[in-house]
Image (tube, rainbow, N blue to C red):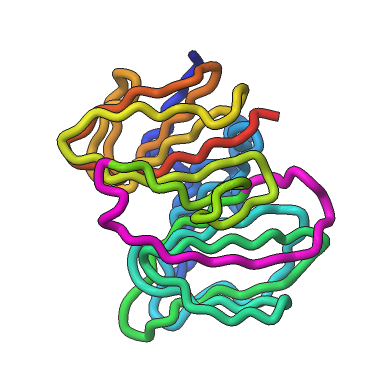
Amino acid sequence: MKKEITLSKDRGKSNFGWLDSKHSFSFGNYQDFSKMGFGLLRVINDDKVAPGAGFGTHPHANMEIVSIPLFGNLAHKDSTGREEVIKTGDVQIMSAGSGLTHSEYNYSNQEEVHFLQIWVRPKEMNIKPRYEQNSYNLEDRINNLQVVVAPNNENAVWINQDAWFSQIKLVENEFTYNINKSGNGVYIFVISGSVQVEGESLNARDGIWISDTDKIELKSNDAEILFMEVPMK
């Protein structure tokens, strides 16, 4: 087993007034060539957007882009014709494929929106751009793994990659995460609370990547956890 921890305080930082962002990997103005991703996982941005502000229309191609709101609502519009509001409990994915443009804005003029933006390199290049969004019951993930992104699960949004994203709220319990595909690695991001992962103590917004194993042992009194399982190459 290989593993490496990224503490919350050691992430990259960008603050533009309207946007306060923390970067687990190199992104935008934050560049650290020792942090260019984990396997085919390229970006984990922890974004807070001020009321009424947001990302103007901009292009993407050949990237799987996942958005997970943690607090507040996010307004989305893209060149596939979709206009949606993404709420807490929702998971959105865009397969940028051969190319699209999109914008993301805070839907509220009173309170900030807080969301995770995650990029995964695609399995097949230049596919037709697509969009998908699902809502999930937060109570269903209490001490239970809730798969939210997958290539083969009808309850999850589809991703153009052999990758699985899952969430759990681990309350006074132990849990074993089993790897879905041999050779994949897992980046574990602690959304809130504290957890022990293979004997390593992690707190809110800490992350740990683990590879070369088929299962991962966790123990927590109360933590919300996001698993991002991806191919290593």
Q: Residue furthest front?
A: 154
Residue at horizontal 44 percent and vertical 42 percent from the top: 11
Q: Position of residue 135 (x, y in %)?
A: 43, 66
| The stretch drawn in magenta includes residue 125 | yes
Q: Position of residue 113 (x, y in %)?
A: 38, 70
Q: Is residue 13 visible?
A: no
Q: Residue furthest bottom?
A: 109
Q: Position of residue 152 (x, y in %)?
A: 60, 46
Residue at horizontal 42 percent and vertical 36 percent from the top: 188
Q: Which residues are magenta?
A: 120-143
Judge by depth and name the residue closer to the eye, 164 or 71.
Answer: 164
Q: Is residue 204 visible?
A: yes
> Residue 88 appears in which quarter of the rendering?
bottom left
> Residue 207 appears in which quarter of the rendering?
top left
Residue at horizontal 61 percent and vertical 54 percent from the top: 158
| The stretch drawn in magenta includes residue 194 | no
Judge by depth and name the residue closer to the eye, 184 or 191.
Answer: 184
Q: Quadrant of the C terminus?
A: top right
Position above or below: 37 against 138: above
Judge left or right: residue 203 versus residue 20: left
Residue at horizontal 82 percent and vertical 50 percent from the top: 125
Q: Position of residue 46 (x, y in %)?
A: 44, 54
Judge by depth and name the residue closer to the eye, 130 or 106.
Answer: 130
Q: How many marks?
A: 0
Judge left or right: residue 157 versus residue 190: right
